[in-house]
Amino acid sequence: MVLRLSLITYLSLFLIGVSGCQEGTTLLGAIVCQGIGRPVGPNPANPLGFRGLDARIPPRIRPGSYASPTPGVRFLDGERIGPHSYWYSWSERNGIVYTCKAGHIDIAHVRKAADWTGFLAAITLECLHNNETEFSFKLREPSLYFVKLTYPADWEGLAKKEQERIARDVSVNLGQYFAYTAATWHEILTWFGYQPKAVQSEFQSAFSWEDVFSNLLGTHIAVLALEDTEHDFSQAVTLALDRQLKELGAQPGQTARRAAEKVWGLWFSRPLFFTVMQRRNFDVGLNDGFVTPWLVPFVPECEGAQAQSLPVPELDFLGQYGFSMKLEIEPREWEKDKVLRIVFGFGAPKRTLSRLGNPFPLDGVPPDVKKRGKRLEPAVDFPRIMDHIQADAIRRYGPDVGLQAGGS
């Protein structure tokens, strides 16, 4: 009996490890990473921090789901997703919800983006509290993020309460900017074959039709939660998430499943045991500053609904307070050279650079790019990388890969 239980346990762990972007990994990852019900207390070094957050404690693991009616995907009633918890909670439910104004939403991605926004805001606030001009952070991927802050000239002369007010506002907005940038970087990495688990690439989940909007929605919800002075972070996220889903027209689970079935063969297919994405949503807000979600056509419960776009976080707010900031990413994944080659052209012949979409030949890489070494500046380099990815997608799938097949 003991042997049988051991075999079942090891087999379960193996299956969870190779299951990829599926709900089944959430339970094990959460328990291993943070335990059950462990409280998040204030950091004594910064008593002015956000309630329910600690810059020393990163969020737990929350793998998402494909928005396709395939094994392992849970479709949820938008009004029954349970309370949010930065730590693991038995009552939190994750899966796919369908909304009339935003299409399919991956609740795990929303929660994860919200938590990372809160965590990065807490880190930033602590650094501002200590008047630090440089700091770094990382998420679950090996990549490192480097931040350089320039304070306003009169910062030291401001009253303490004014400093605290400004620091909180700057931290909230930078936390959102960092989290959304990191979520976009994750999508980029997965396009190039990033494998958080050695046996399976997450390529098929890269820029799937619900991911980018779900991530962005999570950062907006976190901003609302961080501005809530009556509740701790998890409670505030619960309230904000519930409000947002209602405003977006969240539907019952059966509607979410039927909507996914409508785009089978159009947006995705299911040969053998693997989901294959036939359409990708590459809208990360680079063109107009907004991300527009994909709506499944002809969902009776949502007749006449229009897609509700969300603004991506920008840095204009820094000038209001006299701050400036520079963010760089140092890739450390196995796939890093594929991305760096697009930006810097290292080790690639001219004909390869042309095929990859790099606009600079080897002898024409601008000096400012050369000086950066092997770090990326998202504000400068993401547009070039996204151009390459979209060109690669067209080569793989044809010119309609970024269009809502079957949609309007």
Image (spheres, rainbow, N blue to C red):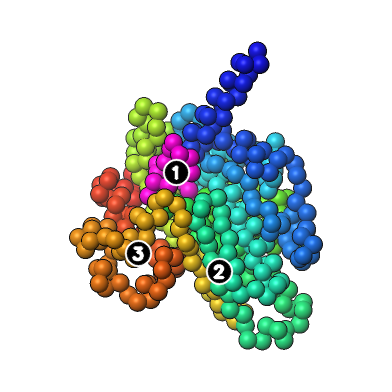
Residue 217 visible within the image: no
Q: Earlier in the sequence, mark 3 or mark 1?
A: 1
Residue flagged by tag 3: what amino acid is it?
Val
Residue flagged by tag 2: what amino acid is it?
Val
Q: For the residues marked 2 and 3, what is the alpha-carbon distance in whole angstroms?
A: 20 Å
Tag 2 residue: 147
Choose between 279 and 4: the one closer to the eye: 4
Tag 1 residue: 195
Q: Which residues are magenta?
A: 192-212
Determine which of the numbered discs, if any, sits on residue 343 in the image: 3
Q: Is residue 108 left or right of residue 229?
A: left
Check the image and report above or below for 246 versus 330: above
Residue 26's quadrant in the figure?
Answer: top right
At x 67% / y 38%, what residue is drawn? 31
Crowding at label 2, few (<14), some or many (≥20) Cα neighbours within 10 Å? some
Choose between 364 and 246: the one closer to the eye: 364
Q: Earlier in the sequence, mark 2 or mark 3?
A: 2
